[in-house]
Amino acid sequence: MNDGQRVSQEMYDWYTRYYTRAPHSAAHHDFCERVYGKDLCQHGYMDMAQLHALLNVLQLSESDHVLELGCGCGLVADYISDATGARVHGLDYIPTAIEQANDRTREKRGRLTFTVGDINTLDFPPATFSAVIAIDTLYFSDLNDTIGRLKLMLKPGGQIGAYYTLMLWNEDDDTTTLQPDRTPLATALTRHGLTFQTWDYTRAEYDRSRLIQKIAPEFQPRFAAEDNLFLFENRMIEANGNAGFYEAGRLCRYLYQVR
């Protein structure tokens, strides 16, 4: 096993553990309610204000067929479909998460479907979807290859809505890549002839990180009592890291609407 395979296996194992434990954790439910505004079993940076901003940009309707990449246990896809009437297909590489999504939404099968799949091997037929949603998931792929595949899967006039955060790990990294038209995602989009608009959520990401730093310690005893202390530790590592990158001027976060 090489280093890349080891990291992938470790990530797979972590997310399997996360989706096995988090949906059943009362502490995690209340934590998400406090931090994100609603418990959608979020693991990432998007709160309800950002989700509503995404929906406002995309203007989905019952006529839309949407692919959500990295859907987890499907609560975000479920919310989007309920709010817009759109048909949503969720894709995630964690079987436990997809099993939960399918079990919970059986009565909505006409507009919600979920399958196990890898973002790096997308193989949907051309012109399948009118919209693709990628909420903090494109980091797990070869951007150039994935954007090329998504472009083919979009119907004429289709769109992509993506939240994308970039952190520069080294002090000598080129800070111009923090500009919305210079990020690795923007570069891949431009390479494939796609146009985009962006909205800046960099400060919102910092504010969310500071909120977690304040709130999460209140939940530490409850996570520990559930034997879910890893959930608390992960949130704190993420929040401390992101706040530090922001304060050092080495973090950006954008919402991209791509056409």
Image: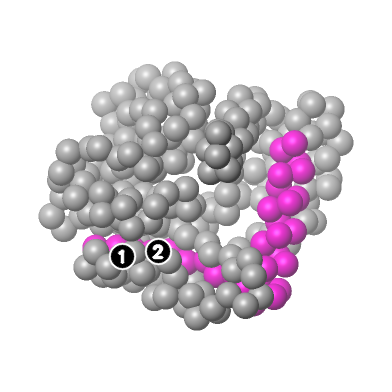
- At label 1, the amino acid type is Leu
- Residue 189 badge: 1
Of all residues, the one furthest to the bottom in this rendering is: 176
The x, y position of residue 43, in whole percent, is 58, 44
- Residue 168 badge: none
The x, y position of residue 30, in whole percent, is 70, 38
Left or right placement of residue 95 versus residue 123 in this view = right
| Depth check, front residue: 62 or 217 | 217
Is residue 20 positioned above or below 248 on the image? above
Instruction: State which quarter of the image contains the C terminus.
Output: bottom left
- At label 2, the amino acid type is Leu
Picture residue at 66% right of the left edge, 35% below the top: 29
The x, y position of residue 185, in whole percent, is 40, 64
Q: Is residue 198 magenta?
A: no
Instruction: State which quarter of the image contains the N terminus.
Output: top right
Q: Which residue is mark 2?
A: 185
The x, y position of residue 64, in whole percent, is 22, 45
Is residue 155 positioned above or below 182 on the image? above
- Number of other residues with Cα within 10 Å of mark 1, as a class: few under 14, some 14 to 19, many 20 or more: many
Left or right placement of residue 199 versus residue 233 in this view = left
Q: Are marks 2 and 1 in contact (CB under 8 Å)?
A: yes
| Depth check, front residue: 167 or 38 | 167
Asked which secondary structure carries label 1, the reply is helix
Left or right placement of residue 163 versus residue 187 in this view = right
Of all residues, the one furthest to the front in this rendering is: 2
- Number of other residues with Cα within 10 Å of mark 2, as a class: few under 14, some 14 to 19, many 20 or more: many
The image quadrant that residue 117 belongs to is: top left
